Amino acid sequence: VGGFFLFKSLRDAEPSPLQTGKTIELALLPQGGSGESGTATLTDMDGKLKVTLTVNGEPVGVSQPAHIHAGSCESLGSPRYTLTDASGGSSETELAGVSVDQLLGELPLAINVHKSTQEAGVYVACGNLIAPGAPVVTTSVDIATSTATTTGTATSTKATTTTEL
């Protein structure tokens, strides 16, 4: 009888295959005086990485390409992952076979939003992906300091950004 309850408690403690994993949230800071800013949330979801972008101050009726780039906002490399274009201030992408841990292993990376498809060389918002607990100084129009912290009871990280004037 005791063995049954031990087995049942161990079985019940196993994670559900649909259980979400880690989450990183980071600020997207304005680039080139665009006035556009926002957040990017990256969440492990059943073998996929869900990337949700929220952009404030975006132009109405314009589709804005977004990518996860190699490098940092200060020195962007080539795009590593293409995200769904931001339209109406938001975007949601699912990347199969990618995880938060995989991205953290590929650092430095940055999420970058472009002005439009026609002006993809103009960057309007960007945020550096950083490892939990690692302080990073990011530059845009203002100097900003980013610090990643662990939040919640689940395995999650949250990068927060404050702007110092």
Image (spheres, rainbow, N blue to C red):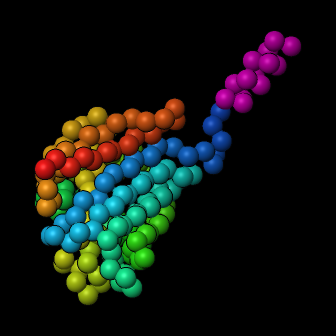
Please tell me which residue lies in front, 153 or 2: 153
Quarter of the image for residue 3 reads top right
Quarter of the image for residue 135 reads top left
- Helix, strand or loop for the magenta stretch, by majority: helix
Quarter of the image for residue 122 reads bottom left
The answer to whether residue 34 is visible is yes
Query: Residue at point 52% right, 35% down?
Result: 154
Query: Residue at point 15% right, 70% down?
Result: 32
Asked if 45 appears above or below 126 in the picture, the reply is above
Relative to residue 109, is residue 152 drawn left or right?
right
Relative to residue 164, is residue 156 drawn left or right?
right
Asked if 162 appears above or below 116 in the picture, the reply is above
User: How many numbered discs sit on the rendered protein?
Assistant: 0
Query: Residue at point 39% right, 85% down?
Result: 61
Question: Where does residue 112 sit, x and y in percent of width and height?
Answer: 27, 65
Question: Where does residue 81 sit, x and y in percent of width and height?
Answer: 34, 65
2 in magenta: yes
Relative to residue 87, is residue 129 drawn left or right?
left
| Residue bounds of the magenta highlight | 1-13
The answer to whether residue 105 is visible is no
Question: Where does residue 68 sit, x and y in percent of width and height?
Answer: 31, 62
Query: Residue at point 27% right, 68% down?
Result: 36
Question: Where does residue 46 sit, x and y in percent of width and height?
Answer: 57, 52
Please tell me which residue lies in front, 30 or 51: 30
Q: Residue furthest front?
A: 165
